[in-house]
Amino acid sequence: MLKEKNLKWLSVFTTILMLFVQIGGALVTKTGSADGCGKTWPLCHGQFVPTQIPKETLIELAHRGVSGLALISVTWLVVLSIKYIGHKRETKFLCFMSLAFIFAQALIGAAAVMWQQNDFILALHFGISLISFSSVFLLTLLIFEVDQKFEATQIIIKNHLRYHTIAITCFIYIVIYSGALVRHAQASLACLSWPLCTKSTFAIPVNFYEWVQMSHRTLAGMLFFWLLYLFIHAVRNYQQYRVIKYGYTVAFILVCLQVTTGALSVMTLLNLNIALMHALFITLLFGLLCYFILLISRAKLRN
């Protein structure tokens, strides 16, 4: 059994592992490897180790292996967290969320393999695993007592920033779902120019794929300008709190990188490296916004 001092190492390992699960899931989708093991799960083509392993099968097997290891690691982290930091008010909730959503992710992944779910259901898969990642990430921050390092209980956050932060975190989940739907509906190249669907001409989308693509771009644009506003607001009004000022600065940098990689994905006709970076940046941004909510729950209130 791990000692308490090694809980930090386990939490870091699990967080990184969950990040690989996120990127691995995006890799499976973007390379068309979802059917790499046929319609069998957890076996691959009905075998424990298939006799032939093409690229798609290797990617799918690797993702399943990392996800399985993550499930074990999260379970272990949850058990030890309840034992050693169970007295912290957020611990049990985050433990439940971490475990519940990684199981939900595994079940949806299995259902997608065996019963071929529709695109709207499949798009939930990335979002569900994102909640599990964020829960593990916040649990890691609790273990490292990051809130105490930044004196979270001494920070005073006004209602304006509180409400906007909670609202934008909910909104970004919708943006993430729309992005996942773009991938699963194979609408990534429905519009070959950026930011408009057609070069230098504003036109209403003419088919389902263009609607999916342009809806995602519109939502992503709203997210960008909303975070820009919060970044300016935080820098101007919370200069005395480093965690607020620098935190929203990092959030704005991440959304800029997200928009940039989104545009480059179209311009490069879905370059794989850029597409995976696109998934990475949104994962980190969502985790950061979830941390802001944790910070808000511990900070002092002022109207």
Image (spheres, rainbow, N blue to C red):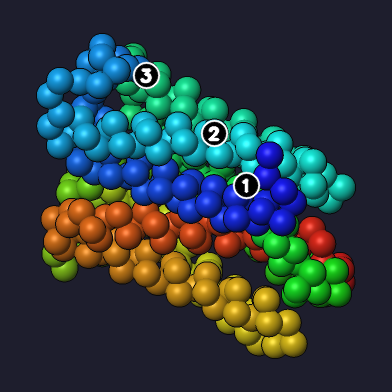
Give the number of the mark in front: 1 or 3. Answer: 3
Q: Secondary structure at mark 1?
A: helix
Q: Examine the image and state in which quarter residue 100 appears.
A: top right
Residue 91 lies, in percent from the top left, at 76, 46
Q: Indicate left or right for 82 with 244 as reference.
A: right
Label number found at residue 42:
3
Q: Secondary structure at mark 2?
A: helix
Question: How many discs mark residues in the rendered view?
Answer: 3
Q: Earlier in the sequence, mark 1 or mark 3?
A: 3
Dots 3, 2 in contact, CB < 8 A: no
Q: Examine the image and state in which quarter residue 282 appears.
A: bottom left
* As drawn, 56 above or below 108: below
The residue nearer to you, when weighing 195 against 287, is 287
Q: Residue at x 25, y 14 (%)?
A: 47
Callout 2 amino acid: Ile
Q: Indicate left or right for 64 with 229 as reference.
A: left
* As drawn, 216 above or below 118: below
Q: CA distance from mark 3 to mark 2?
A: 15 Å
Q: Residue at x 66, y 87 (%)?
A: 236
Label number found at residue 72:
2
Callout 1 amino acid: Ser
Residue 72 lies, in percent from the top left, at 54, 33
Q: Residue at x 37, y 64 (%)?
A: 258
Few, some or many C-alpha atoms within 10 Å of disc 1 (few <14, some 14-19, many ≥20)? many
Callout 3 amino acid: Pro
Give the number of the mark in front: 3 or 2. Answer: 2
Can the viewer see residue 202?
no
